[in-house]
Image: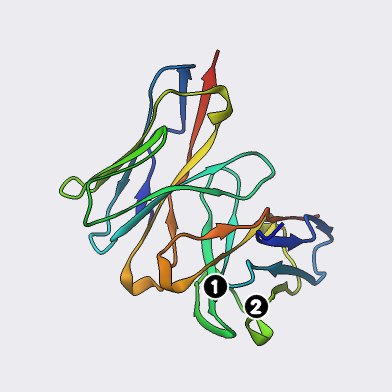
Amino acid sequence: DTGVSQNPRHKITKRGQNVTFRCDPISEHNRLYWYRQTLGQGPEFLTYFQNEAQLEKSRLLSDRFSAERPKGSFSTLEIQRTEQGDSAMYLCASSLGTTGYEQYFGPGTRLTVT
Amino acid sequence: DQQVKQNSPSLSVQEGRISILNCDYTNSMFDYFLWYKKYPAEGPTFLISISSIKDKNEDGRFTVFLNKSAKHLSLHIVPSQPGDSAVYFCAASAPSTLGRLYFGRGTQLTVWP
């Protein structure tokens, strides 16, 4: 399977704990995006990498959120001191920047903060 | 502010008929539009796209129409099949946004036999 993969698929954590999610994009894709989706909403942009460079961050990404993409391969999204409002589906997508805007999404990580 | 709007949260269509899903946008800088389909517990799956230099793009049973003057696009599915039942998201992008997609809230399509 050469699609986008995300781990874990589900995460339940207590408020105040730190969590980290991983995304493995399609191997030849140089662009990687993180989105967040809550119930009844479409995905909302969080941040974007081109290779290893983080080029844009949404205002939704508070100081408790950090993302990395070392060596331009997989990416991690960390949330520190989780809050109940962080409960959402976290989606990763990748694209090949030279061929258009189509982004291919992973299955997502469902975060529940209790 | 919601720059991409899908005003119909749900649509129910009989198998074999046409499904028409609508989408409006407010940002005139958007130049590329996409439709995604999403099943429960899965990520969105890319379906079809259209550039602003076109007004129609067709792929099998799926056709997307773009009306730039009205800032409106629609997705036509003909004929509709029960397996098409899913949430459909409209998304848009602009040259200045580095490929970032702006999504609507989605329309739940139900195709019944």
Please state if B21 lies on the left or on the right of B82 as rendered: left
Task: Identify the residue shown where x is 33% and y is 66%.
Answer: B94
- Name the amino acid, label 2: Ala
Q: Around disc 1, counting alpha carbons within 10 Å, would you say few (fewer than 14), some (14 to 19), or many (20 or more)?
A: many
Say which chain tag 2 marks: A
Where A71 falls versus A103 (above or below)? below
Please state if A61 lies on the left or on the right of B21 as rendered: right
Q: Position of residue A74 (x, y in %)?
A: 69, 75
Marks 1/2 in contact by CB < 8 Å: the verdict is yes
Outermost left residue: B69
| Residue A47: assigned label | 1
- The quarter holding residue B18 reads top left
N-term mark: 1 or 2 = 1
- The quarter holding residue A17 reads bottom right
- The quarter holding residue A32 reads bottom right
B9 or B19: which is nearer to us?
Answer: B19
- Name the amino acid, label 1: Thr
Q: Quadrant of the C terminus of chain A?
A: bottom right
Q: Position of residue B64 (x, y in %)?
A: 33, 41
Q: Position of residue A44 (x, y in %)?
A: 51, 59
| Residue B59: assigned label | none
Task: Identify the residue shown where x is 52% and y is 47%.
Answer: A41
Give the color scheme: rainbow, by chain, secondary structure or one colour: rainbow
